[in-house]
Image: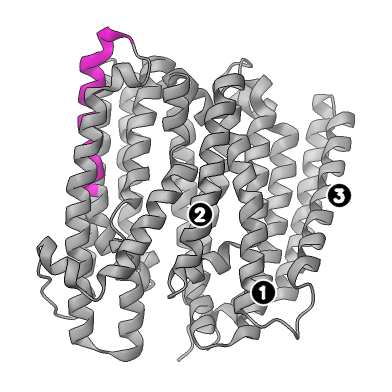
Amino acid sequence: MPKKPNHFFKNISSNYFIYAAKLAVGLYALPVCLAAYGSEIYGLYLLSFGLSSALAAFDLGSSRSIYRYTIEFGSDNNLEKFKTALDTSYSFNLFSAILTATLIIILGQFSTTLFNLPTDSKQTATTIFLLAAINTFITMLDAAPQSLITANNLFHARNKYIGVSIILNLMIILAVQYSSAINIELYAFLVTITSIFVWFMDHELVKSKNLLKGIKVSFKNLTYLKRSEYADYSLQVFGLSLISFMAIQADKLIIAIVLDTSAVTLYTIITKPYVVFKGILAATIPVVQPKLNEYYFNNLSNNFIQLSRKFTRISFFIMLCCTILIGLYYKDLLSIWLKTNIYNSYANWGIISMATLCLTLFYTQFLRTLLHSNKIKYIIYFSIIGVSINVITSTILSYYIGFQGVIIGTTVQIALELIYYKYLERKFISTDKLNLTGYNYLIYIFTIILLSVVCFIMLEYFITTYLLKIVSFIVLLSAFSIVMYMILIKENIVKRATLH
């Protein structure tokens, strides 16, 4: 049976609501913690717990494997195969959680030297990294039940208790703001407690919905895992995760090593729009992705391309409008948000980082589909090259010009990925009957981007007073909203995404 449109709306709307709540708490937390702990110590927290989130991808491919084999079980109902795959994936998950937590503890032992910190902050750094290691362990273990929940499209059910965790985080922030008793170590401890709460609730949801289908997962040793027929895919995904970490997630690590933890705080502030809208995309794409996977694996090339292009056109227009709106008023927003204008001179770098998301939209759907196929090796081969260019560029430029070098390195990699994955899409998917394919499509992309840049520069030049800014914001927001409504009606994305 086809999925009902209201099921689609329930999932995506609850994802948006939860993300908006997380965003609001995060925006509120940053200036509060910055004032309470200072840029250096808070930068240390951002680095360690940022690594905690980033290294969660090093789960030896277990989360993607669980997602893939859950989808396959829905098609073939092979319970024995599903159990064997789960045994392998859960075992990889446990081993990777132990290894990654150990790595963060080791980093904590050398943090003062590695990240240019004062020697008197060693105890604080060691404690924070220890708590980050615990948080990493819990987060990585939670990847297993979370993948089962995601593969079964239970976003709305999960978001109910995620909302509770957000409230807990807000209470922690308020305690920091109004009480001097919450030092940075206690703050990190309380944040870790919320991760434990989410992990526990995910397990309860898996049990209540019987997502394991009555299977009792058995943890296997390394000898068994080496022989497992499911190990190859997991290790390929792990290799890709390792490469991807060096491309994107290692930004803060590079900045901390080349510069210092204060620069990490500055980078976090300036790239906030990028993080915000990347999170919005992360809340949206998983809802559409299962249908794209279905079209791809059933060789329905035209359906795949049509849905992918529909989603791309809608998301690209929204992202482009947001980039223009945020860009025009980002300096004012920074001043209001942080109650200082000392960061305004870096504002344009935040918009550049945000603009790169517009480029990723033209290949993200195809890339994510390829990740769940037997063609993942094409991603790994290219990523080794692209990531190497990114890391080298970021490191060298960061040394000479500051954290901005990381943004430039990431932009270079994204541009290369756009060209490469459009080439693979043309190679693997027949698009003869569709318009705007191949390199003509790239010309179309860059034409729109060029016109948008010219429009942005002109608007920024003429809009100088606060009155003009307020009027122009209302006019632009209204115009974008009207056009967006017309595009949504024309594209009818909900019908396409829910139709079998």
Amino acid type, mark 1:
Arg
Q: Earlier in the sequence, mark 1 or mark 3?
A: 1
Q: Percent x, y for residue 487?
A: 75, 68
Tell me what residue is drawn at x 21 percent, y 31 percent.
Answer: 106
Q: Position of residue 454 (x, y in %)?
A: 87, 42
Q: Which mark is residue 383?
A: 2
Q: Quadrant of the N terminus?
A: bottom left
| Left or right position of 162 against 220 | right
> Would you say the residues marked 1 and 2 are in contact, meaning their CB atoms lie under 8 Å apart?
no
Residue at the image position 25 percent from the left and 35 percent from the top? 104
- Callout 1: SS: helix
How far apart marks 1 and 2 lie (CA) works out to 19 Å
Most foreground residue, 155 or 41: 41
Instruction: Specify start and end residues of the magenta stretch as a single range.
Output: 118-138
Q: Which residue is label 3 attached to?
A: 451
Q: Residues within 10 Å of mark 2 (few under 14, many from 20)?
A: some
Disc 1 versus disc 3: distance between alpha carbons? 26 Å
